[in-house]
Image (tube, rainbow, N blue to C red):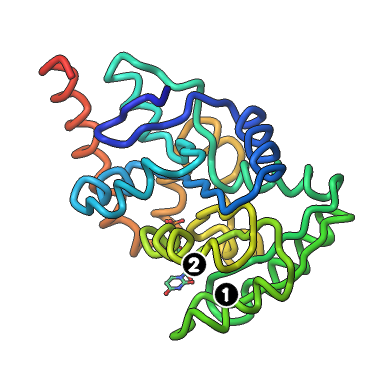
Amino acid sequence: MRTDILGVGFDQVTLDQAVDRAMALLEQDGPHLVVTPNAEIVQQARSDPEFAALIAGADLVLPDGVGVVYAARILGRPLPGRVPGADFAGALMARLARTGGRLFLLGAKPGVAQLAAQRLQAQYPGLNLCGTHDGYFQQDEPVVQAIREARADVVFVCLGAPRQEKWAAAHGGQTGARLLVGLGGSLDVFSGQVARAPEGWQRLGLEWLYRAIRQPARFKRVAKLPLFLGRAVGARLRGK
Ligand code: UDP
């Protein structure tokens, strides 16, 4: 059973449970899709039925942002907590480093995924990083082939939403990977190009504000958050 937040169903899982579920999915034939919607993505899904259907059909739907967790509380059906995509990815890599699973990094500007791979390799000794590709390609086939030849078990698909989910759904099967995870701008963070909010900000649930201050272009996106929470209040008042 998923918890419906303004049309998107979220799994009721903590970070540890999410990683356990992902590891279990890796034991079964793929492709499996993990998505990490935040408030902005829930809004996008409301006006993009194809995207909404993709999320509904995903194997794991994790609440990336604090906005989703607040909306859940407003709606009277709280989630166990936020499961930020970057934290989920980190915990998954720690497990993969122990089990030997092969990880491919796809997305971001040329050079960024390679840099991320170098840093992640140092951070998670034993992690089997089997390949990288930037996210600014015109043709899908060479990318699919690169993943297939790398014999990846897991692919972090970091092309931004909804492109990454649509790409994973359309091409996941051909890649041979068992698990594809949509992770937005995570490679920019893993490569050190973009700093994550300090822990205090994260604890207060203000990571979105920190990112908006550091990247003012984001303010327009963040400005939609009150509208999102307003929708949750409206839905609660209408008894939905
Ligand atoms: N990106 C990409 N290919 C594209 C467009 C974007 O690889 O055609 C990358 C972009 O470089 C960035 C990520 O996708 O690394 C999207 O980051 P953003 O911060 O917008 O995503 P969010 O984390 O907010 O979903």
Q: Quadrant location of ligand 1?
A: bottom left
Residue at the disc numbered 1 = 144
User: Where in the figure is residue 122, as x and y percent of width and height?
Assistant: 84, 60
- Answer whether labels 2 and 1 touch (C-beta < 8 Å): yes
Query: What SS does tag 1 mark?
Result: helix
- Mark 1: give few (<14), some (14-19) or many (20+) Cα within 10 Å: some
Query: What SS does tag 2 mark?
Result: helix
Task: Please state if 173 lies on the left or on the right of 128 as rendered.
Answer: left
Task: Please state if 53 lies on the left or on the right of 141 as rendered.
Answer: left
Residue lying farthest to the left in this orientation: 238
Residue for point 40% across, 26% down? 2
Give 144 or 215, whichever is nearer the viewer: 144
Say above or below: 63 vs 151.
Answer: above
Residue for point 47% across, 40% down? 64
Residue for point 39% across, 64% down? 163
- The amino acid type found where label 1 is placed reads Val
Q: How many marks?
A: 2
Say above or below: 78 vs 200.
Answer: above
- The amino acid type found where label 2 is placed reads His
User: Where in the figure is residue 61, as x and y percent of width and height?
Assistant: 46, 38
Say above or below: 150 vs 59.
Answer: below
Residue at the disc numbered 2 = 171
Among the 4 quarters of the image, the one containing residue 127:
bottom right
- Which quadrant is home to the C terminus? top left
- Which quadrant is home to the N terminus? top left
Task: Please state if 7 lies on the left or on the right of 27 as rendered.
Answer: left
User: Where in the figure is residue 43, as x and y percent of width and height?
Assistant: 25, 46
